[in-house]
Image (cartoon, rainbow, N blue to C red):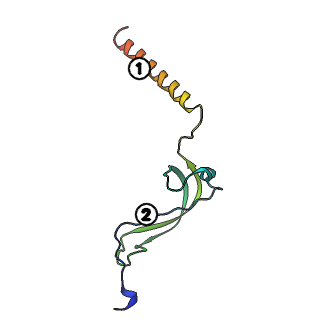
């Protein structure tokens, strides 16, 4: 069999990858390898192609390349005051529910 006609068997989908620099998203300096993070991206599409990079017989897959213009972490930043703020929000919510319930019950 000719070497160029061998098609590799793909066991599972290969996910897209993304490289970011601290210039685009400074908080990555503090992130840890192996952990998951939520990121909002602003991108510009540079190209779009049909066909798998891994299976030449699959012409249905769409691949696109993007230039990252900006990024924002969607993670809640840990801070010493976070627990206090969350407790204040819970208390305000409970007071609003109690007030609405009281008004609904005719009180």
* Above or below 24: residue 89: above
Q: Residues within 10 Å of mark 2 (few under 14, many from 20)?
A: few
Q: Position of residue 26 (x, y in %)?
A: 64, 51
Quadrant position of the N terminus in the picture: bottom left
Could you give the CA–CA distance between mark 2 and mark 1, rounded to whole angstroms?
Answer: 45 Å
Disc 1 is placed on an element classified as: helix
Q: Please tell me in which quadrant of the rendered image residue 94 appears.
A: top left
Residue at the image point whose x is 55% and y is 54% from the top: 42
Disc 2 is placed on an element classified as: loop
Q: Position of residue 9 (x, y in %)?
A: 34, 76
In terms of depth relative to the viewer, which is nearer, 25 or 56?
Answer: 25
Q: Which residue is mark 1?
A: 97
Q: Which residue is mark 2?
A: 15
Quadrant position of the C terminus in the picture: top left
Mark 2 or 1: in front is 2
Residue with the most extreme bottom position: 2
């Amino acid at each position: 069999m000719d070497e160029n006609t061998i098609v590799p068997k793909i066991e599972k989908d290969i996910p897209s990858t993304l490289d970011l620099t601290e210039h685009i998203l400074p908080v990555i300096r503090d992130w840890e390898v192996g952990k998951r993070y939520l990121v909002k991206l602003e991108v510009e599409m540079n190209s779009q192609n049909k066909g798998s990079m891994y299976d030449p017989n699959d012409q249905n897959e769409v691949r696109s390349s993007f230039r990252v213009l900006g990024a924002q972490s969607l993670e809640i930043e840990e801070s010493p005051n976070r627990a206090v703020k969350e407790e204040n929000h819970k208390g305000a919510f409970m007071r609003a529910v109690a007030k609405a319930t009281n008004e609904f019950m005719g009180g």
